[in-house]
Amino acid sequence: MLRASRSPLLLPGLVGLLVLGACSRPAAPLKVLGAHADADSPRVVGAALVRDGDSRDELLRRHPRVEPDAALTSTLKAILADSGQRLRWSAAPAEDLECDNGDVRFRIQVRVPPACRERACPVLAFYTTGCPRPDYHWRPEFFLRAGFIFAEPAVRGTKCSEDWARADNGPLRVAAATDLEAASRCLRQRFTRNGVVPRLGILGWSYGGNQTLVGMTRFAGSYDAGFAFAAKTDLASFLSQTTPELRGARASEYGDPERDAERLRVISPVTWVDRVEAPITLMLGARDPKVSLSDADVFVRKLRARGQDATLMIIPEHAHLTERPEEIAFEHAHLLQFFTTRFGVPLRVDTRP
């Protein structure tokens, strides 16, 4: 049951949106602060890949859209509409945590909610290609207000500099992925308080979704639960299904399906699926031409065959990047429900300024 500090929660920004919608013509779908330029690009909106022999309709029936808690979704929409005018915990000074992985050093930007400054709290590691910025953002705002410490590791591959962004390309990716394990050690050590080791979750979209699955498979035990969006589970299979243009564009990043078959095997999450020991959820868009529904189905069935807590949800109307308010609230409501349930903590969203 969602508990918010004020009920009902209807912030001024949301009221403005509702009034504007009532008195104006239908407009283009709203985006939000920090919306990705590719969110509505034709090249990332189409139909997700399906292997020969699989039925798209059957996969959608097998892994249907499930609605999250309505009260939670409404609260997240209101926080989103506020746009940091009143609710600005994420704008507080962030901590830069320095982490070592052998002779490689990287930083993790960490935001801590007020209630977690002196006591142990669950930690969520968010992986993305972007270099962490210490300003207000609605995503950490959601998690901070739900009682999570929000961490953004700048591991090899993040775009903090040109060299660092390329530091996991091609043959470098196998070694660079060990930063995921190092980040886990670093975060657990930093936020262990009074002998209590924090529960640690991992999440991300697209590149970050792939990082999530690698963290949960190849480095099983590093994270206690993982939620991956728009992630590829089998890179060799994906490259065999995708267009020649995208296959060529990803060659320097992942490898060539013929020349680099062994590397693709090693860096694919499905290769390490037998190592998994913690809950995993995947969410894919049926209009995302960069993912394979068939591969995700195989991945989840392999986990379930071993008795693992594994879920796949296919959203018929979602594409690769979801940046509209209703999409954001839907996805993040599922995220909060997943991590609070798996970590055994109450789902409370603090809506005080």
Image (tube, rainbow, N blue to C red):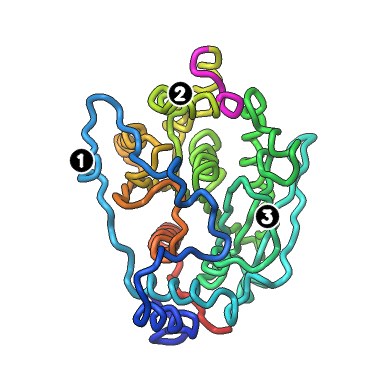
Residue 296 higher or lower than 351, as above or below: above
* Magenta stretch secondary structure, dominant: loop
Residue 313 within the segment the image draws in magenta: no
Image spot of residue 169 (x, y percent): 64, 29
Neighbourhood count class around disc 2 (C-alpha, 10 Å): few under 14, some 14–19, many 20 upward: few
Q: Secondary structure at mark 3?
A: loop
Residue under the image location 68 percent in, 66 percent down? 135
Residue projecting furthest to the front: 25
Residue 337 higher or lower than 52, as above or below: below
The residue carrying mark 1 is 57
Q: Are marks 2 and 3 in contact (CB under 8 Å)?
A: no
Q: Tell which of 232 and 199 is nearer to you.
A: 232
- Give the CA separation, mark 2 to mark 1: 25 Å
Image spot of residue 254 (x, y percent): 56, 27
Q: Which mark is residue 279?
A: none
Q: Which mark is residue 244?
A: 2
Residue under the image location 52 percent in, 53 percent down? 201
Name the front one of labels 2 and 1.
Answer: 2
Residue projecting furthest to the top: 259
Residue 253 within the segment the image draws in magenta: yes
Residue under the image location 22 percent in, 43 percent down? 62
The amino acid at mark 1 is Asp
Range shown magenta: 251-258
Q: Secondary structure at mark 2?
A: helix
Residue under the image location 55 percent in, 37 percent down? 219
Neighbourhood count class around disc 1 (C-alpha, 10 Å): few under 14, some 14–19, many 20 upward: few
